[in-house]
Image (spheres, rainbow, N blue to C red):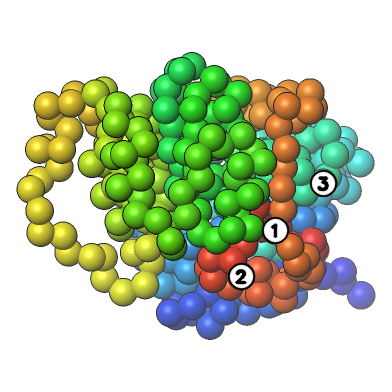
Amino acid sequence: MTETYGALRLERFAPTFRDAVDIVRLPLTLPGPGEIRVRNRHCGVNAIFDTQIARNAVDYVKVAPPSFTGVEAIGIVDAVGDGVSGFAVGDAAATVRFSGGYREANVGPEAQFIKAPAATREWLALASTGVSALLALDHVGQVQAGETVAVSAAAGGLGHFCVQLAVLRGARVIGVCGGAAKGDFVRSLGAERVVDYRTEDLGAVLAAEYPRGLDVAIDTVSGTIFDAFLANLAPHGRLVVGGAASDLEGRPEVVTAPRIAHAIYYKGASVRGFMNGLLTPLWPAARAEMFQLYAEGRLAVTFDEPRFTGLAGIYDASERLLSGQSMGKVVVDL
């Protein structure tokens, strides 16, 4: 009997990930020349991206059903093809390439995989979301010691890495999140000020408590948080846009206001887009630094609870992340 593996496959475009994607079983093939086969143990969840893929709304990724889904996974190499030199059976291997995530097994060129110290959730989070956080902060935000840095969604997978990295860089950190539990968590990471956007006016807090302004702001939310960050940039401040979660449902808000030029010109400030997929040449060095910081005990990796398991658990994990309740990186155990 032919051995099979399970995967989440986009079968149709639909308003939600759950409606668009089915669990399918497929023949498990051997790797060809230059390829390896990995049995995945964990996958990372990127719910906003997943939802937009389901809706065929990601401009830079063109998909046509049927198509595999998911971006990041880690597991153990169980077969190697001829000519493979970077991996051996038993090695831990991660992938952060689209369509490699939500599947129990993955066969592909060895260049699509990353060797990891172990096939654990921690190394997966560092190799994927951790790399994004470091590049957003250092490469795009160009943070320097002594600067003031604000991070939206600071208790999330990306945000909790950004807070820690900014602290390690010697910055003063302001974390923006919702609720007391998330606030306590962000303080534990080293943020000197936590703003609860549900009970506090972010713009008023920044204007009153940080009159010199923000040198760097990392925003993945958009809406009023983006507006507050933009209005409170310091001279030469950098507002890094890594997402727009508040615009996921419905049409983006139409804002009638002076053009952004009026907010940045006299300050010499800038608004910069962060798209990790455009920075692939920088991934290896960023990954090596994240791995080293974790190995030295200088960086913590936090995962959301409860734990989700199996391919079916990916649906629930994605919806949990979209609910705004998650804290830390959302990972599913396969």
Helix, strand or loop at mark 3? loop
Residue 120's label in the rendered image is 3
| Marks 3 & 1, CB-CB < 8 Å contact | no
Of residues 153 and 46, the one drawn nearer to the viewer in this rendering: 153
Of residues 167 and 30, the one drawn nearer to the viewer in this rendering: 167
How many other residues sit within 10 Å of disc 1, few (<14), some (14-19) or many (≥20)? many
Nearer mark to the viewer, of 3 and 1: 1
Q: Residue furthest top?
A: 145
Across and down, in percent, residue 50 comes to 52, 64
- Looking at the image, residue 60 lies above or below residue 140: below
Quadrant of the rendered structure where residue 238 is? Answer: top left
Q: Residue furthest front?
A: 208
Q: Which residue is the site of mark 2?
A: 320
| Residue 27 showing in the rendered view | no
Please tell me which of labels 3 and 1 falls first in the chain.
3
| Marks 3 & 2, CB-CB < 8 Å contact | no
